Image (spheres, rainbow, N blue to C red):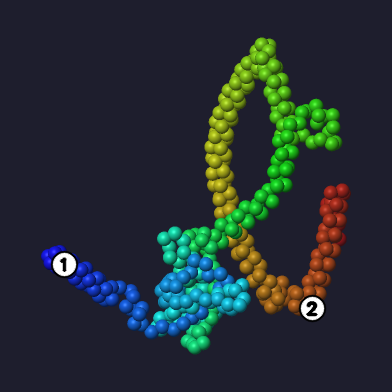
Amino acid sequence: MNEERSRDYRVGMFISLAMVILAVLILLYGEEPKWFWSTKWKLEVSVKKPQGIEEGTPVFLEGVKVGRVAEIRLRNPKQPDEGAIVVVEVEEQHRIPIESTASLHPKFGFDKGAIQIVAPSRATDALPIGPPAPVIQGRMVGALESIVPEEFITNMTAAVEQIGNLGGELKPVLTNLNLLLEPRTTEEVDRSAEQMVANISTLVQRMDASFKHVNTVLGDEAVQMDLKTTIATLRQTAESLKQLVNNTDQRIEKLTIRADETMVNLNDQVTQVARKLADTLDNMSGVLSELDTMASAVNQGQGLLGKIIHDPKMYEELLTSIDELEQLLIELRKLAASIQTDGLKTKLR
C-alpha cells in the first residue's frame, strides 16, 4: 500500500513539475506575457450588431496587430436596438488616426475573427487617449466578404452591372438579327415588296435557285461544248497576245536604242552649233565695241564725221557740194544721152 502511495506521489509531483515548466515556457516565449505586462489604452468601436466578435478577438491597424477586444456591451441597455460598443485595448505604443473606421470580421470556421481598423487616406492627427475612451464607427463584414477580398467583390459587382447594361444594349441588336434570320420565302417578299423586306433567308433561297439554274445550264452537253470551244479560243487569244507583247517589247527596245543614238548625234550637233554661236557672239561683241568707240569719237567731234556733225558751217558746205555734184551728174547724164543719140559733135571756132 505504501509503495502505491509513493508511486502516485511521484507521478503527481512529475505532472505538477511539468505544468510549472510549461507555464514558465509560456511566460518566457509566448504572446501572453507581453500582453499582460504592457501598458494599454482603451478604444471604443460603435457597431450595430457585433455578431461573431467576442472577448480576445485580435485587433489590427492596416494589417498590424495593435490590441484585442476586452469587452462587449450594449450602448443603451434600455434600448438594445441602438447597437453595441466593442471595447478594444490598444497597446500604448500604437496610435489610431482620427477619422479611422473599423471592419468587424466575425468567426467563420476555424477563423476566430478579427477587427480591422482602416486609417483615412489623408494624414490626420491621432485620437486622444482617454478617459473618456475615443469612439470610432464600425461595420460588420459578411462571411463571404471575410473569405473573398472586398476589392474582388466590388469588381465582380461592377462586372455584373456592365454585363447587364451590355445585355440591355444588345437587345435591339438581337431583335434586328432575329428579323434578318427569320424564314421569309421569295414568294412572300415578291407579293408584299413594300411591307416585307428580303432578309438573309430570302437571299439564300435566291442564291440556291440561281445555283440550280446554273447547274441546269452547265449540265447541257451543247453548252459544255460551247464552253470548251470558248476556253480554247481564249487560250489561243492569250497566246497571240503574249506573242504580240513580246514582239512589241523587241521593237520598243530597238526604237529605244535608235532614239538613244539620235539623241547622242543631236547632242553633238547642238554642241557644235552652240560653239559657233558663241564665236559669232564674240565677233559681234568686238564689232559692237568698235561701233561704240566710233560713236564716242563722233560725239566728241573727232574725225570727219564728228566735225561734220558738230560744225554747222562745214555741214552746210557739205550740203552745197552734194547739190553741185547732183547738178553735175544730171548734166553728165544729159550729155551721155545726147552722145548716144546724135554722136559726138565738135564745134570749131
Residue carrying label 1: 5
Which quarter of the figure is the N terminus placed in? Answer: bottom left
Residue 23 % position (x, y)? 27, 73
Residue at x-position 50% and y-position 84%: 133
**Residues at badges 2 and 1 in contact (C-beta under 8 Å)?**
no
Q: Nearer the viewer, residue 70 or 255?
A: 70
Which quarter of the figure is the C terminus placed in? Answer: bottom right
Residue at x-position 56% and y-position 37%: 256
Residue at x-position 53% and y-position 37%: 257
User: Regarding mark 2 in the picture, which secondary structure is present there?
Assistant: helix
Q: Mark 2 to mark 1: distance in Å?
A: 186 Å
Q: Nearer the viewer, residue 117 or 10?
A: 10
- Residue 60 in view of the camera: no
Q: Quadrant of residue 293?
A: bottom right
Toward the top, the furthest residue is: 221
Q: Callout 2: 10 Å neighbours few (<14), some, many (20+)? A: few
Q: Nearer the viewer, residue 159 or 209?
A: 159
Residue carrying label 2: 313
Amino acid at circle 1? Arg
- Residue 106 in view of the camera: yes
Residue at x-position 61% and y-position 72%: 81
Of circles 2 and 1, which is in front? 1
